[in-house]
Image (cartoon, rainbow, N blue to C red):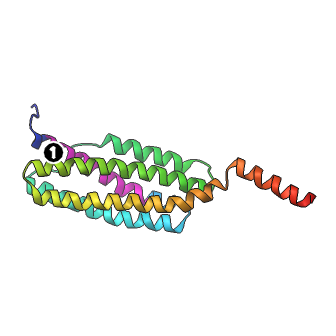
């Protein structure tokens, strides 16, 4: 049966988000475990709690719509989670791995920000202000999570840059010149 209304698209996109969020509920504990930085680990643990609440909000919307949340697999999130899993298996130093995990997590956040912005706009167009408010709440949480990751990246990426071969070589040359002097 052909889907030809904004309502159909709205429900389809909500199912995609529900799949994305349930995938994240499984991925976030792994990200927290892989993080060596305590603040980063805590950020993932906090976002896991938020993600569980976001799943509940989506379930509330589906109940209001008289629809089931299941039936769709979010391929975009599946790919982002797979990329993150592959990075966590790499043999990087702790600081460099944390920098990579942040990059992957921010890609996830940006994906979610785009998706929630879209469905919130659909809810408004469809005259569903209560659902729009629930989606706006989640959208704001995703933006805050992205901002927190940006703040953590400032310190973590700086530590990772100290591990780069160019920096190691510079430190070695500096130490040799100090010894020679």
Q: Is residue 120 left or right of residue 75?
A: left
Position of the N terminus, as image quadrant, is top left
Left or right: residue 178 compared with residue 125 = right
Q: Nearer the viewer, residue 180 or 113?
A: 180
Q: Residue at coordinates 82% horizontally, 52% vertically from top-left? A: 173
> Residue 31's spot in the image, x, y percent?
46, 57
Magenta-drawn segment: 9-29
Question: Is residue 154 placed above or below 5 in the rendered structure?
Answer: below
Task: Look at the magenta stretch and give its main secondary structure.
Answer: helix
What residue is shown at x 42% (from left), y 63% (from top)? 148
Residue 136 at x, y percent in the picture: 22, 58
Q: Residue furthest front?
A: 181
- Does the magenta segment cover residue 15? yes
Q: Is residue 20 visible?
A: no
Residue at figure coordinates x 48%, y 48% from the top left: 85
**Which secondary structure lies at badge 1?**
helix
Percent x, y for residue 74?
30, 43
Q: Which residue is mark 1?
A: 10
- In the rendered image, is residue 173 in sight? yes
Query: In the picture provided, is 143 more to the left or to the right than 92?
Result: left
Residue 12 at x, y = what percent?
18, 43
Q: Quadrant where the C terminus lies? A: bottom right
Q: Is residue 130 magenta?
A: no
């Amino acid at each position: 049966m052909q889907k030809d209304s904004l309502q159909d698209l709205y429900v389809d996109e909500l199912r995609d988000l529900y799949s994305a969020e349930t995938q994240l509920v499984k991925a976030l504990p792994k990200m927290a475990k892989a993080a060596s930085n305590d603040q980063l680990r805590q950020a993932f643990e906090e976002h896991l709690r938020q993600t569980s609440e976001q799943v509940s909000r989506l379930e509330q919307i589906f109940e209001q719509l008289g629809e089931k949340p299941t039936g769709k697999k979010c391929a975009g999130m599946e790919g982002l989670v797979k990329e993150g899993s592959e990075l966590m298996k790499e043999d990087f130093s702790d600081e460099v791995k944390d920098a990579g995990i942040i990059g992957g997590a921010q890609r996830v956040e940006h994906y979610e920000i785009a998706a929630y912005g879209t469905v919130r706009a659909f809810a408004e167009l469809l005259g569903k202000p209560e659902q729009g408010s629930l989606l706006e709440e989640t959208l704001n949480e995703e933006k805050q999570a992205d901002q927190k990751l940006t703040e953590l990246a400032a310190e973590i990426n700086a530590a990772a840059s100290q591990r780069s071969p160019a920096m190691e070589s510079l430190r070695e040359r500096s130490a040799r010149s100090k010894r020679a002097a």
